[in-house]
Image (cartoon, rainbow, N blue to C red):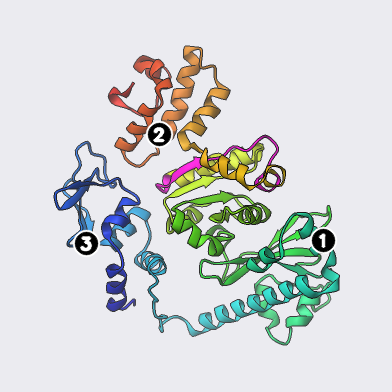
Amino acid sequence: MIPDAVLSQIQERLDIVEVVSDFVPLRRAGRNFKANCPFHEERTPSFVVNPDKQIFHCFGCGVGGNVFSFLMKFEKKDFREVVEALAEKTGVEIPKDRTENPAAQKRTAQALEANRLALEFYHECLLTKAEAQTARRYLESRGIRRETIEHFKIGYAPESWDALYRALKDRASEETLEKNGLVLPKKGGGFYDRFRGRVIFPILDAKGICVAFGGRVLDQSLPKYLNSPESEIYSKGRNLYGLFQARKSVRENDGAVVVEGYMDLIACHQAGVTGVVASLGTALTEEQARLIRRHTSNVTILYDADKAGEMATLRGLEIFLEQALEVKVVRLPEGHDPDSYLQERGGEALKAELAGAKSLFEFRLSLAKAKHDAGALEGRVKIANEMALLLGKVRGRAEAAAVFTAHRSFRSVGRAGLRAGGGAVDFGPLV
């Protein structure tokens, strides 16, 4: 149970108008604020937010409540998830649940301590050990500065089969080390290190606690990157690399930049683009999008300029759109990733690219026009239908309509053209 005093403290530090307006475009109506209800389709606004009572109510569908119930319904989360997210946002500490399984608490504490020890081992090795000279030269060749290494606690895993195991075996149990994915069992007994001869990137949660690691080889061997496996303390799809370091910048600038990899993120950070997170080498997940939304409602996708990057961008666009985030896209020159672009053109050039980022719809429109002949009716119908499918996913008909009318190029398609193409969304008088 979360104490009522904690809930009251969270509510005192929040304004329901600000929270709701992150997801729903509110307009002042006297002492209150109104909008089209996000929970049912309507043409006339009947969704009201009362700042004096800190509640919301829809006179159309009857839904209502406080800031907690709004987020539970909008984000489809349970009560505790919402409270924990708001507690983190407002800096309120939730007392530990004493009814939680003591054994589970102990396992978690042991796992986190093992990761803390491993982080210290890898980091110290990179900074001071002679065997890490190749790793230091590699990072130097990539332009990574000493202060950046220390800021992100970058480390090095020695090539020895069991250097980490020998260093930690008297300070953490073999079971914990194995469950964390730090060591693997030998067939004949004993253990060997998972990460060997790799630059190590600690993965911290939003509170700065190390939950996992990523490792990169220094030669051409495969796999190029190796990550910690899923565990009791780590789920890849629910974490973002660099979030802890980026939180302040993301909130101050009300925007996050999403990149693919560790080196992309670190290069951006060094160039002064500090509100950057990375999706840990996996396709972006809904959980990661929600994690970003706790800190900002604006996101820019900065993926590699290749086919895989384009596909990842398209997947990310839809996920962010479904989570009601404002999305922009930067398309780097062909063949570049953020790291290589920065090495060739520098930080000011990247900042200019970010400043000129395309909106979600501009990006999708440019792709559609590249695929279809906009000079022919059939091509225009296909373009319009692709955009209509996308616009149909926008939360709220009014927002979709506003964006649709912004693209005058669609007006030449005409209502008949959309019907002929089987348009999936009815935009009424807009075409």
At which x and y percent is residue 351? 57, 45
* Secondary structure beneath label 1: helix
Label 3: which residue?
Answer: 54
Name which residue lies at 50% across and 58% down: 249
Whether residue 81 is situated above or below residue 377 in the rendered picture: below
Callout 3 touching callout 2 (CB < 8 Å):
no
Side (left or right) of 41 relative to 149 = left
Mark 2 residue element: helix
How far from the left and from the top, in percent, is residue 302?
Answer: 58, 45
Residue furthest to the left in view is 30
Q: Is residue 373 magenta?
A: no
Q: Inspect this view and state whether residue 254 appears.
A: yes
Image quarter hosting the C terminus:
top left
The residue wearing badge 2 is: 391
Kind of residue at badge 2 = Leu
- Mark identifier at residue 137: 1
Q: Separation of disc 1 and disc 2 at Cα?
A: 49 Å
Range covered by the magenta-colored residues: 322-340
- Residue 174, position in %: x, y? 71, 81
Circle 3 — which element?
loop
Going from N to C along the chain, the mark reached first, 3 or 2, is 3
Q: Quadrant of the N terminus?
A: bottom left
- Is residue 228 visible in the rendered image? The answer is no
* Amino acid at the residue labelled 3: Gln
